[in-house]
Image (cartoon, grey):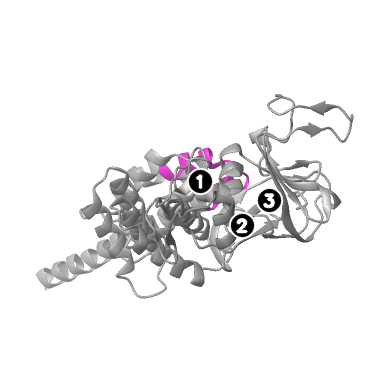
Amino acid sequence: MASWKSTAFSFMLLIVLAALAVGGVAGRQWWQARTVRRDLALARQHLDQGKPEMAEQILATRMETSKPTSAWSAALVDLRFEALEAMNDVTAEQMLAGQVLDEQRPWVRSGEPAWARAEIIQGRVALKAQQIDQARQHFLRVLGQPQGAQGQAEAELGLARIEMAIGKVPEAKARLDAMLETLAENHPVRAGVEHNLGLINTTMLLSREPFGEDEIYAVTKGDSIYKIARRFEVSQDLIMRVNQISDPSRLSIGRRLKIPRLDLSIVVDKSNNTLTLYNQGKFFKKYQVRTGEYDYQTPVGDFEVRTKKKDPAWTSPQTGKHYAAGDPENQLGTRWMGFSGNASLGIHEAVDESSIGTYSSNGCVGLARADVEELYDLMRRGAPVKIVGEKATPALKL
């Protein structure tokens, strides 16, 4: 009888101890989850206040003391990626991506946003190191997820950059053109697509090899650059630049010239200080510009490129002082493209390149020297120019 009671007591004691143990584990898990939620909220607060370094310190410490694959680990990694991006700490981003993709200690499951971001980062690293096959595998893994999954536009852009790196330029152009048709104006990848597409379009245009509708023309007796440009309705400067002609008076009969077939137009948007170049209505390239200090100075409306001049002289509208071409105080720089309907309005070099992106001109559209010299060669007289948008009002600091 006593033995039976002893056995029952021991059994009940085991049950109680087990319950206490389970309760203790549950309690510890609850406390840890509460601590993690607190740290995530505090890190989020620091990020919103523009203090990414403080957020990163909290998140890095939490990852060092926590186990991966927990219910909150994906949120932790997502927020840490955001902090590192705000800090522009590329090296730390790459290290975190390696942690995320570590098969021995996976912090997130395949297909989740942080996983896709890690694949994209590692793909970029491999591409920069010219490890083409490895880079392609990273991007294809993201694209292998169900359509619409996180990171697929970035992966598609990665494949286009691979095609550019290995010389498949027409294939890259086709891919980027297709992407541009589907991406919203505010999509975070769109700027990268436009940048790379602009590089491709200008590279193809300025090369000696014909693409698309470009023609090869053999010079005949009586030809001149001026006559050829008028016949094909393209810029004389563009024909000379593409065909590397330094002296237009020495044009030999029978010489074969590449004639780009273009129908270029310009849209200047004051709301974001950009100049977008279109060819036959399709995106060609985008440039950053500066516009008028006051909204009325750069008027909205439709214009044409009326005049073109290299190394122009300039008269200050404030002082009336005249500056010769090449004078360091000449604010027109190396190129001038004047508009129809307004003799004082046009496109020229912004001598102070730090002013690009600001509202600081007397009304003209200013570009960096390399950009304005490229644009000058591309544009013909009579090309349409549209100015749209309003000067952006800076946000108030509360």
Quarter holding the N terminus is bottom left
Residue under label 2: 276
- Residue 277 in the image: state x and y as whole percent: 59, 58
Residue range highlighted in magenta: 41-60
**Three-letter code for the amino acid on which mark 1 is drawn:** Met
Would residue 56 appear left or right of 128 to someone viewing this image? Answer: right
- Judged from this view, the residue extending furthest toward the right is 319
Q: CA distance from mark 2 to mark 1?
A: 23 Å
Q: Residue 70: tell me if it is visible.
A: no
Tell me the chief SS of the magenta region.
helix
Tell us which disc is closer to us: 1 or 3.
1
Quarter of the image holding residue 354?
top right
State the mark number for residue 273. Answer: 3
Mark 1 and mark 3 residues within 8 Å of each other at the beta carbon: no
Q: Secondary structure at mark 1?
A: helix
Tell us which disc is closer to us: 2 or 3.
2
For marks 2 and 1, the one nearer the N-term is: 1
Q: Secondary structure at mark 2?
A: strand
Would residue 107 appear left or right of 261 to someone viewing this image? Answer: left
**Three-letter code for the amino acid on which mark 2 is drawn:** Thr
- Judged from this view, the residue extending furthest toward the top is 328
- Within-10-Å neighbours for mark 2: few <14, some 14–19, many 20+: some
Q: Secondary structure at mark 3?
A: loop
Residue under label 1: 240
- Residue 212 in the image: state x and y as whole percent: 41, 66
- Within-10-Å neighbours for mark 1: few <14, some 14–19, many 20+: some
- Residue 38 in the image: state x and y as whole percent: 51, 52
Tell us which disc is closer to us: 2 or 1.
1
- Within-10-Å neighbours for mark 3: few <14, some 14–19, many 20+: many
Q: Is 315 drawn above or below residue 185 in the view shown?
A: above
**Three-letter code for the amino acid on which mark 3 is drawn:** Asn
Q: CA distance from mark 1 to mark 3?
A: 30 Å
